[in-house]
Image (tube, grey):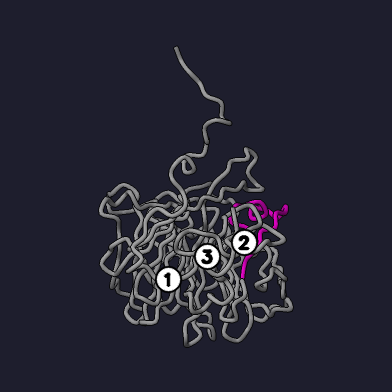
Amino acid sequence: MTTTMSSDLVEQTTALRRPTGLRAINPAKAYDGYTLIAPSFGGTTTRLIDLQGNEVHRWELPWPPGLGSVITDRQTLLCSGRIVDDQPFLGRAPFKGGVVAEVGWDGDVLWEVRHPSHHHDAILLRNGNVLLLGLGQVPADVAARVRGGIGADGAPMFADTVVEMTTTGGIVWEWRSWEHLDVDVDRIGPGPMDRIEWTHGNGLAELPGGDILVSMRQISTVLRIDRTTGTIRQRIGAGELAGQHSPWLTGASTVLVYDNGFNRADGWPPYSRAVEFDLATGEEVWAYTDPVRWDFFSALQSSVQRLPNDNTLICEGLTGRIFEITTDGEVVWEYTNPYAVTSPTDPDGVRSNRMFRAFRYGREQLGPLAGSPTEKELIQP
Protein backbone atom coordinates (compact mmCIF):
# COMPACT_ATOMS: atom_id res chain seq x y z
CA MET A 1 0.00 0.00 0.00
CA THR A 2 1.27 3.45 -0.89
CA THR A 3 0.78 6.32 1.56
CA THR A 4 0.76 9.92 0.38
CA MET A 5 0.88 13.09 2.44
CA SER A 6 -0.67 16.41 1.57
CA SER A 7 1.74 19.16 0.59
CA ASP A 8 0.32 21.35 3.36
CA LEU A 9 1.77 18.88 5.90
CA VAL A 10 5.18 18.45 4.29
CA GLU A 11 7.29 21.35 3.02
CA GLN A 12 7.83 20.74 -0.70
CA THR A 13 10.96 22.89 -1.13
CA THR A 14 13.90 20.64 -0.30
CA ALA A 15 16.12 23.38 1.15
CA LEU A 16 13.38 24.41 3.58
CA ARG A 17 12.96 20.90 5.00
CA ARG A 18 16.51 21.18 6.30
CA PRO A 19 17.42 23.21 9.39
CA THR A 20 17.53 26.95 8.74
CA GLY A 21 18.70 29.96 10.72
CA LEU A 22 21.90 29.81 12.77
CA ARG A 23 23.63 26.47 12.24
CA ALA A 24 27.01 26.92 13.95
CA ILE A 25 29.10 29.59 15.68
CA ASN A 26 32.51 29.97 17.28
CA PRO A 27 32.11 33.42 18.89
CA ALA A 28 35.81 33.69 19.68
CA LYS A 29 36.75 33.51 16.00
CA ALA A 30 33.72 34.86 14.09
CA TYR A 31 33.76 38.52 13.06
CA ASP A 32 31.17 40.36 15.14
CA GLY A 33 28.75 42.35 13.06
CA TYR A 34 25.56 42.33 11.03
CA THR A 35 24.99 40.37 7.82
CA LEU A 36 22.95 41.83 4.96
CA ILE A 37 20.67 39.31 3.28
CA ALA A 38 18.02 39.59 0.57
CA PRO A 39 16.05 37.14 -1.59
CA SER A 40 17.20 36.71 -5.16
CA PHE A 41 14.07 37.11 -7.22
CA GLY A 42 11.01 37.95 -5.12
CA GLY A 43 9.59 39.57 -2.04
CA THR A 44 10.40 43.17 -1.13
CA THR A 45 12.35 42.75 2.11
CA THR A 46 16.08 43.19 2.71
CA ARG A 47 17.30 42.29 6.21
CA LEU A 48 20.16 42.69 8.63
CA ILE A 49 20.83 39.78 11.00
CA ASP A 50 23.23 39.55 13.92
CA LEU A 51 25.62 36.67 14.67
CA GLN A 52 22.85 34.73 16.42
CA GLY A 53 20.69 34.92 13.30
CA ASN A 54 18.27 37.45 14.82
CA GLU A 55 16.81 40.06 12.51
CA VAL A 56 17.70 43.52 13.83
CA HIS A 57 16.69 45.73 10.90
CA ARG A 58 14.78 45.51 7.64
CA TRP A 59 14.00 47.58 4.58
CA GLU A 60 10.71 47.20 2.70
CA LEU A 61 11.42 48.22 -0.88
CA PRO A 62 9.05 49.36 -3.65
CA TRP A 63 10.17 46.44 -5.86
CA PRO A 64 11.71 42.99 -5.45
CA PRO A 65 15.34 43.49 -4.39
CA GLY A 66 16.83 42.19 -7.63
CA LEU A 67 20.48 41.18 -7.48
CA GLY A 68 23.07 42.93 -5.39
CA SER A 69 22.68 45.15 -2.31
CA VAL A 70 25.35 46.81 -0.16
CA ILE A 71 25.48 49.24 2.74
CA THR A 72 27.36 52.39 1.76
CA ASP A 73 29.91 54.32 3.80
CA ARG A 74 27.16 56.80 4.64
CA GLN A 75 25.10 53.95 6.14
CA THR A 76 22.48 53.82 3.42
CA LEU A 77 21.37 50.85 1.32
CA LEU A 78 22.42 50.76 -2.34
CA CYS A 79 20.21 48.24 -4.07
CA SER A 80 19.10 47.03 -7.47
CA GLY A 81 15.38 46.60 -8.00
CA ARG A 82 13.65 44.18 -10.32
CA ILE A 83 11.21 45.50 -12.94
CA VAL A 84 9.49 42.86 -15.06
CA ASP A 85 8.75 44.05 -18.61
CA ASP A 86 8.45 42.78 -22.17
CA GLN A 87 11.94 43.67 -23.37
CA PRO A 88 13.25 40.94 -25.72
CA PHE A 89 15.29 38.26 -23.94
CA LEU A 90 16.07 40.30 -20.81
CA GLY A 91 12.59 41.49 -19.82
CA ARG A 92 11.53 38.40 -17.91
CA ALA A 93 14.95 36.85 -17.39
CA PRO A 94 15.56 35.97 -13.73
CA PHE A 95 18.56 38.30 -13.54
CA LYS A 96 16.75 41.41 -14.85
CA GLY A 97 17.12 44.57 -12.76
CA GLY A 98 15.97 47.87 -14.21
CA VAL A 99 16.28 50.26 -11.29
CA VAL A 100 19.14 51.25 -8.95
CA ALA A 101 18.39 53.22 -5.80
CA GLU A 102 19.87 54.51 -2.59
CA VAL A 103 17.60 53.97 0.38
CA GLY A 104 17.89 55.58 3.80
CA TRP A 105 17.91 53.69 7.08
CA ASP A 106 14.21 54.42 7.52
CA GLY A 107 13.35 53.08 4.04
CA ASP A 108 12.98 56.39 2.21
CA VAL A 109 14.22 56.27 -1.40
CA LEU A 110 16.81 59.04 -1.63
CA TRP A 111 17.25 58.75 -5.39
CA GLU A 112 16.73 56.18 -8.12
CA VAL A 113 17.85 55.75 -11.71
CA ARG A 114 16.37 53.46 -14.31
CA HIS A 115 18.03 51.79 -17.27
CA PRO A 116 16.05 49.41 -19.52
CA SER A 117 18.83 46.82 -19.91
CA HIS A 118 20.27 46.96 -16.38
CA HIS A 119 20.85 43.54 -14.86
CA HIS A 120 22.76 42.01 -11.98
CA ASP A 121 25.13 44.49 -10.36
CA ALA A 122 25.43 48.22 -9.73
CA ILE A 123 28.01 50.08 -7.62
CA LEU A 124 28.67 53.62 -6.44
CA LEU A 125 31.84 55.09 -7.90
CA ARG A 126 34.16 57.29 -5.91
CA ASN A 127 33.01 60.28 -7.99
CA GLY A 128 29.43 59.77 -6.75
CA ASN A 129 28.06 58.31 -9.98
CA VAL A 130 26.52 54.87 -10.47
CA LEU A 131 28.12 52.12 -12.53
CA LEU A 132 25.80 49.37 -13.71
CA LEU A 133 25.74 46.36 -15.99
CA GLY A 134 23.62 46.60 -19.13
CA LEU A 135 23.04 44.42 -22.16
CA GLY A 136 23.17 44.90 -25.92
CA GLN A 137 22.85 42.79 -29.06
CA VAL A 138 26.13 41.71 -30.62
CA PRO A 139 26.50 42.59 -34.32
CA ALA A 140 25.75 39.49 -36.40
CA ASP A 141 29.15 39.42 -38.09
CA VAL A 142 30.90 39.42 -34.69
CA ALA A 143 28.50 36.88 -33.17
CA ALA A 144 29.17 34.45 -36.00
CA ARG A 145 32.87 34.38 -35.07
CA VAL A 146 32.44 33.88 -31.30
CA ARG A 147 33.77 30.47 -30.28
CA GLY A 148 32.29 27.96 -27.86
CA GLY A 149 28.82 27.45 -26.46
CA ILE A 150 25.76 25.71 -27.83
CA GLY A 151 22.79 27.09 -29.70
CA ALA A 152 21.46 27.82 -33.15
CA ASP A 153 23.84 29.55 -35.55
CA GLY A 154 22.50 32.90 -36.67
CA ALA A 155 20.31 33.40 -33.59
CA PRO A 156 20.63 36.74 -31.77
CA MET A 157 23.52 36.99 -29.33
CA PHE A 158 23.75 39.43 -26.42
CA ALA A 159 26.71 40.76 -24.47
CA ASP A 160 27.37 43.23 -21.71
CA THR A 161 27.68 46.96 -21.57
CA VAL A 162 29.02 48.87 -18.57
CA VAL A 163 27.19 52.15 -18.07
CA GLU A 164 28.07 55.11 -15.82
CA MET A 165 25.11 57.30 -14.82
CA THR A 166 24.63 60.29 -12.59
CA THR A 167 22.15 59.91 -9.74
CA THR A 168 19.79 62.11 -11.73
CA GLY A 169 19.75 59.63 -14.61
CA GLY A 170 22.23 61.03 -17.11
CA ILE A 171 24.55 58.65 -18.98
CA VAL A 172 28.16 59.88 -18.96
CA TRP A 173 30.11 56.81 -20.13
CA GLU A 174 29.35 53.47 -21.75
CA TRP A 175 31.57 50.51 -22.58
CA ARG A 176 30.37 47.90 -25.10
CA SER A 177 32.06 44.57 -24.55
CA TRP A 178 31.86 43.32 -28.15
CA GLU A 179 33.97 46.28 -29.28
CA HIS A 180 36.90 45.12 -27.10
CA LEU A 181 36.64 41.34 -26.66
CA ASP A 182 38.76 38.95 -28.70
CA VAL A 183 36.71 36.21 -30.39
CA ASP A 184 39.67 33.83 -30.30
CA VAL A 185 40.60 34.44 -26.66
CA ASP A 186 37.28 35.24 -24.96
CA ARG A 187 35.58 31.93 -25.68
CA ILE A 188 32.33 30.76 -24.13
CA GLY A 189 32.99 27.98 -21.64
CA PRO A 190 34.13 25.71 -20.22
CA GLY A 191 31.27 23.37 -20.96
CA PRO A 192 28.02 23.69 -22.91
CA MET A 193 26.82 27.23 -22.13
CA ASP A 194 24.08 28.78 -24.25
CA ARG A 195 25.34 31.03 -27.07
CA ILE A 196 22.49 33.51 -26.57
CA GLU A 197 24.92 35.33 -24.26
CA TRP A 198 28.58 35.87 -24.96
CA THR A 199 29.56 37.33 -21.59
CA HIS A 200 26.82 37.45 -18.87
CA GLY A 201 28.43 39.97 -16.53
CA ASN A 202 27.44 39.54 -12.89
CA GLY A 203 29.74 41.70 -10.75
CA LEU A 204 31.59 45.02 -10.76
CA ALA A 205 34.40 46.60 -8.73
CA GLU A 206 36.31 49.89 -9.02
CA LEU A 207 40.06 49.71 -8.51
CA PRO A 208 41.95 52.53 -6.70
CA GLY A 209 43.46 53.79 -9.97
CA GLY A 210 40.07 53.93 -11.70
CA ASP A 211 40.14 50.67 -13.68
CA ILE A 212 36.98 48.55 -13.53
CA LEU A 213 36.74 44.82 -12.84
CA VAL A 214 33.85 42.96 -14.48
CA SER A 215 33.10 39.33 -13.71
CA MET A 216 31.83 37.60 -16.86
CA ARG A 217 30.38 34.16 -16.26
CA GLN A 218 30.06 32.93 -19.83
CA ILE A 219 33.76 33.35 -20.58
CA SER A 220 34.82 32.39 -17.01
CA THR A 221 37.04 35.45 -16.71
CA VAL A 222 37.27 38.64 -14.66
CA LEU A 223 38.17 41.48 -17.01
CA ARG A 224 40.17 44.54 -15.98
CA ILE A 225 39.04 47.50 -18.09
CA ASP A 226 40.95 50.73 -18.61
CA ARG A 227 38.47 53.54 -17.99
CA THR A 228 40.30 55.95 -20.29
CA THR A 229 40.71 53.79 -23.40
CA GLY A 230 38.22 50.98 -22.79
CA THR A 231 40.87 48.39 -23.55
CA ILE A 232 41.03 45.13 -21.62
CA ARG A 233 44.21 45.41 -19.56
CA GLN A 234 44.02 42.04 -17.83
CA ARG A 235 42.13 38.75 -17.96
CA ILE A 236 42.06 37.33 -14.43
CA GLY A 237 41.32 33.65 -13.89
CA ALA A 238 41.07 32.74 -17.56
CA GLY A 239 41.52 28.98 -17.83
CA GLU A 240 41.13 28.54 -14.05
CA LEU A 241 37.61 29.76 -13.30
CA ALA A 242 34.29 28.17 -14.20
CA GLY A 243 31.28 30.48 -14.27
CA GLN A 244 32.40 32.73 -11.38
CA HIS A 245 30.61 35.55 -9.50
CA SER A 246 31.24 38.44 -7.12
CA PRO A 247 34.69 40.06 -7.42
CA TRP A 248 35.62 41.50 -4.01
CA LEU A 249 38.65 43.76 -3.64
CA THR A 250 40.76 43.18 -0.53
CA GLY A 251 43.11 45.62 1.13
CA ALA A 252 46.10 43.58 -0.02
CA SER A 253 45.94 44.30 -3.77
CA THR A 254 44.11 41.06 -4.44
CA VAL A 255 40.64 40.15 -5.64
CA LEU A 256 38.45 37.39 -4.21
CA VAL A 257 36.07 35.52 -6.50
CA TYR A 258 33.33 32.95 -5.93
CA ASP A 259 34.26 30.26 -8.47
CA ASN A 260 30.94 28.43 -9.02
CA GLY A 261 32.32 25.47 -10.93
CA PHE A 262 29.18 24.08 -12.59
CA ASN A 263 31.23 23.14 -15.68
CA ARG A 264 34.79 22.27 -14.77
CA ALA A 265 37.57 21.04 -17.02
CA ASP A 266 39.35 19.06 -14.29
CA GLY A 267 37.11 15.99 -14.38
CA TRP A 268 35.69 16.41 -10.86
CA PRO A 269 31.96 16.46 -10.14
CA PRO A 270 30.75 20.09 -9.88
CA TYR A 271 32.11 21.93 -6.84
CA SER A 272 32.61 25.56 -5.82
CA ARG A 273 35.54 27.34 -4.27
CA ALA A 274 36.56 30.76 -2.98
CA VAL A 275 39.69 31.87 -4.78
CA GLU A 276 41.98 34.91 -4.46
CA PHE A 277 44.14 36.39 -7.22
CA ASP A 278 47.02 38.85 -7.06
CA LEU A 279 46.01 41.91 -9.09
CA ALA A 280 49.57 42.65 -10.20
CA THR A 281 50.40 39.20 -11.53
CA GLY A 282 47.01 37.53 -11.94
CA GLU A 283 48.32 34.53 -10.01
CA GLU A 284 46.18 32.54 -7.58
CA VAL A 285 47.37 33.15 -4.01
CA TRP A 286 44.69 31.45 -1.87
CA ALA A 287 41.73 29.15 -2.33
CA TYR A 288 39.16 27.27 -0.25
CA THR A 289 37.15 24.17 -1.04
CA ASP A 290 35.16 21.98 1.32
CA PRO A 291 37.04 18.88 2.60
CA VAL A 292 34.46 16.96 0.54
CA ARG A 293 34.60 19.16 -2.55
CA TRP A 294 31.08 18.68 -3.88
CA ASP A 295 29.52 19.46 -0.45
CA PHE A 296 30.26 23.13 -1.17
CA PHE A 297 28.53 24.02 -4.42
CA SER A 298 26.22 26.58 -5.97
CA ALA A 299 25.89 26.46 -9.74
CA LEU A 300 24.81 30.12 -9.94
CA GLN A 301 24.79 33.35 -7.93
CA SER A 302 26.86 33.49 -4.66
CA SER A 303 29.50 35.81 -3.18
CA VAL A 304 32.70 36.14 -1.15
CA GLN A 305 33.90 38.92 1.18
CA ARG A 306 37.17 39.38 3.07
CA LEU A 307 36.39 40.54 6.61
CA PRO A 308 38.51 42.89 8.76
CA ASN A 309 39.74 39.95 10.90
CA ASP A 310 41.05 38.24 7.71
CA ASN A 311 38.26 35.68 7.74
CA THR A 312 36.20 35.18 4.59
CA LEU A 313 32.41 35.28 4.41
CA ILE A 314 30.94 33.03 1.71
CA CYS A 315 27.38 32.98 0.40
CA GLU A 316 26.44 29.69 -1.30
CA GLY A 317 23.62 31.37 -3.16
CA LEU A 318 21.30 28.68 -4.49
CA THR A 319 21.14 26.90 -1.12
CA GLY A 320 20.70 30.08 0.92
CA ARG A 321 23.74 29.13 3.01
CA ILE A 322 26.23 31.64 4.42
CA PHE A 323 29.37 30.63 6.27
CA GLU A 324 32.55 32.23 7.58
CA ILE A 325 35.98 30.61 7.44
CA THR A 326 39.44 31.44 8.73
CA THR A 327 42.43 31.71 6.40
CA ASP A 328 43.20 28.02 7.01
CA GLY A 329 39.65 26.96 6.14
CA GLU A 330 38.13 26.48 9.60
CA VAL A 331 34.37 27.14 9.60
CA VAL A 332 33.51 29.49 12.50
CA TRP A 333 29.94 30.55 11.63
CA GLU A 334 27.13 29.16 9.48
CA TYR A 335 23.59 30.31 8.75
CA THR A 336 20.90 29.18 6.30
CA ASN A 337 18.36 31.71 5.08
CA PRO A 338 14.91 30.81 6.50
CA TYR A 339 13.03 33.41 4.45
CA ALA A 340 11.49 31.87 1.33
CA VAL A 341 9.87 33.89 -1.46
CA THR A 342 8.28 33.29 -4.84
CA SER A 343 9.68 34.83 -8.00
CA PRO A 344 7.26 37.08 -9.94
CA THR A 345 8.36 35.34 -13.14
CA ASP A 346 7.88 31.77 -11.86
CA PRO A 347 4.58 30.40 -13.24
CA ASP A 348 4.64 27.50 -10.78
CA GLY A 349 4.91 29.67 -7.67
CA VAL A 350 7.88 27.76 -6.24
CA ARG A 351 9.20 29.15 -2.97
CA SER A 352 12.97 29.46 -2.57
CA ASN A 353 15.46 30.75 0.01
CA ARG A 354 18.21 31.43 -2.54
CA MET A 355 20.27 34.61 -2.34
CA PHE A 356 22.50 36.43 -4.79
CA ARG A 357 24.94 37.73 -2.15
CA ALA A 358 25.49 38.34 1.55
CA PHE A 359 27.83 40.87 3.15
CA ARG A 360 28.76 41.57 6.78
CA TYR A 361 29.28 44.97 8.38
CA GLY A 362 31.08 45.54 11.66
CA ARG A 363 29.27 46.34 14.87
CA GLU A 364 31.45 49.45 15.19
CA GLN A 365 30.08 50.66 11.82
CA LEU A 366 26.39 49.87 12.22
CA GLY A 367 25.89 49.21 15.93
CA PRO A 368 24.40 52.62 16.80
CA LEU A 369 21.84 52.18 14.01
CA ALA A 370 21.17 48.44 14.00
CA GLY A 371 21.10 48.02 17.75
CA SER A 372 21.44 44.60 19.31
CA PRO A 373 19.23 42.07 21.13
CA THR A 374 20.27 43.63 24.44
CA GLU A 375 19.56 47.17 23.29
CA LYS A 376 16.21 46.94 21.53
CA GLU A 377 13.39 44.56 20.83
CA LEU A 378 14.21 42.13 18.05
CA ILE A 379 12.25 42.25 14.82
CA GLN A 380 10.29 39.03 14.47
CA PRO A 381 10.17 37.11 11.16
Type of secondary structure dominating the magenta stretch: loop
Q: Is residue 91 magenta?
A: yes
Instruction: Judge by depth and name the residue closer to the eye, 131 or 366.
Output: 366
Q: Name the element at disc 3.
A: loop
Q: Quadrant of residue 375?
A: bottom right
Mark 2 or 3: the one toward you: 3
Residue 286, given in percent of the width and then of the height, sits at 29, 70
Instruction: Answer yes or no: is residue 218 visible.
Output: no
Q: Quadrant of the N terminus?
A: top left
The kind of residue tagged 2 is Gln
**Residue 173 vs residue 335, the one in the foreground:** 335
- Circle 1 SS class: loop
Is residue 286 positioned above or below 211 on the image? above
Work out whether 292 lies above or below 141: above
Q: Which mark is residue 32?
A: 1
Residue at (30% x, 66% y) in the render: 287
Residue placed under numbered mark 2 in the picture: 137
Q: Amino acid at mark 3?
A: Pro
**Which residue is under mark 3?**
373
Say whether residue 38 is visible.
Answer: yes
Q: Nearer the viewer, mark 1 or mark 2?
A: 1
Mark found first going from the N terminus, 1 or 2: 1
Spatial CA distance of label 2 from label 3 is 50 Å
> Which residue is drawn at the image coordinates 34% and 75% (left, top)?
310
What residue span does the magenta drawing correspond to?
78-96
Query: Cβ–Cβ below 8 Å for labels 3 and 1?
Result: no
